[in-house]
Image: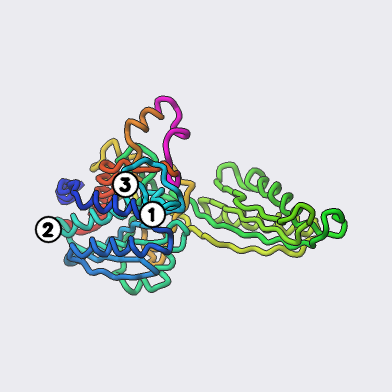
Amino acid sequence: MSNSIERMLNEFQHQSWQREFYEAMHRQPELSGQERQTAAMILKQLERFDCEVISPIGGHGIVAVLRNGEGPHVLMRADFDGLPVTEQSGARYASKVEGRMHACGHDMHTTALLSAISLFDAHRDHWAGTFIALFQPSEENGTGAQTMVADGLVNKIPTPTVCFGQHVVAGPAGRVFSMPGAAAAACDSIEIGIQGKSAHGSMPHNSVDPTFAAAMIVVRLQGIVGREIAPQDFAVISVGTLESGHSNNTIPGEARIVVNCRTYSEKVKAKLYAAIERVVRGECSASGCHPPTFRYFAHGPLTDNDPHVFARVRANFDAAFAQESRTANRWTASEDFANIPSAFGVPYLYWTVGCTPHEQWEAAEASDTIGQDIPVNHMATFLPDYEPTLEACTKATIVAAMTYLRHQ
């Protein structure tokens, strides 16, 4: 790790504005596509820094560009939407909006990126190049990154040399997890429409029962992963919705199934989706239903870390965080972050940062109850341990960016 990176890390301090911003954002979460107030809060903070602000891009998206002479261009992304969850964390700054919560830590991501901007802006003598801070809305519904791209992101900001993203997760607060290759799963949801023929419940012979077909489809779908995907590969098919009928004595005319699928491989994904369509078509044909319909939505790209970027950044993570720099396990959750570097055709690295209070993690680890006792993302009790998590997220951003930015 260079002296310039070390000097930048030593400049980090917990300041009151960071905590005030984080708590204000946590109190007022906004759902995907509705982040007007949050975007205004971010823009207000950016007024304090010497940067070019480009907004809006793709709804409520914001980009801040800090130029500091010749050198590489580094992009760091933070998402800022909340979730439709009623908070039960007990925090004094808990959400004031019923049914909405920052249950995934996007408020921490945003605060950390602003914190990194403040360091880059105040200590330009340590680096040269361009730091691009991208604040992305609508991550939770998987549309935000692609919407920013569709709104001309590639033509509105400098082309980055490399892109970075991070996410807080359950784990000892301040521990940084990174890995090369597939780090988060690709995902899609598939809505399946089954058209039969309605009849009175007392005359089933006059019907073509879509409920029976749907039930058989759900059963058969469970066999695809177990019997068609190799044991060393990863795939998930989860049936999240099964709808059919609204009356106790009527066989309905149609049924609806929604499945969610996740893989770490485009090859496995293609095989999985072909098998799903084959099973659905086969069961509909066997039941005498009309040909089914398929609608693919909520796409999340595979997060596939560039091994060369990983190797360069990981060496500095290890130097900066010592024993708190660890190798990540693959995340079965999905992200839309990769749509941004993909649009520019540049490599990227996406890592995670633990946010669980150490004493809570260690107690659960000692009793082997981590899976039961530790709140994870999207739970109503999820709440990052503020100080160590913010410090690690800010410093990880600095380390990754400074790995590429020219040192002075």
Residue lying farthest left?
125
Residue drawn at (74%, 55%) of the image: 247
Which secondary structure lies at badge 1?
Answer: loop
Where does label 2 land, which residue?
125
Which of the two residues, 316 or 331, is positioned nearer the viewer here?
331
Q: Residue at x 33, y 60 (%)?
A: 38
Q: Which quadrant does the C terminus fall into?
A: bottom left
> Would you call the spot at circle 2 few (<14 residues within 10 Å), some (14-19), or many (20 or more)?
few
Q: Which mark is nearer the camera, 2 or 3? A: 3
For label 1, the residue is: 306
Position of residue 220 in the picture relative to residue 105 (left or right): right
The first of marks 1 and 3 along the sequence is 3
Q: Are marks 2 and 3 in contact (CB under 8 Å)?
A: no
Checking the image for residue 93, the label placed there is 3
The kind of residue tagged 1 is Asp
Q: Nearer the viewer, residue 33 or 326?
A: 33
Distance, label 2 to label 3, CA atoms, is 37 Å
Position of 295 with respect to 406 (left or right) is right
- Residue 374 inside the magenta-drawn segment: yes
Sequence order check: which comes first, mark 2 or mark 3? 3
Part of the protein shown in magenta: 365-379
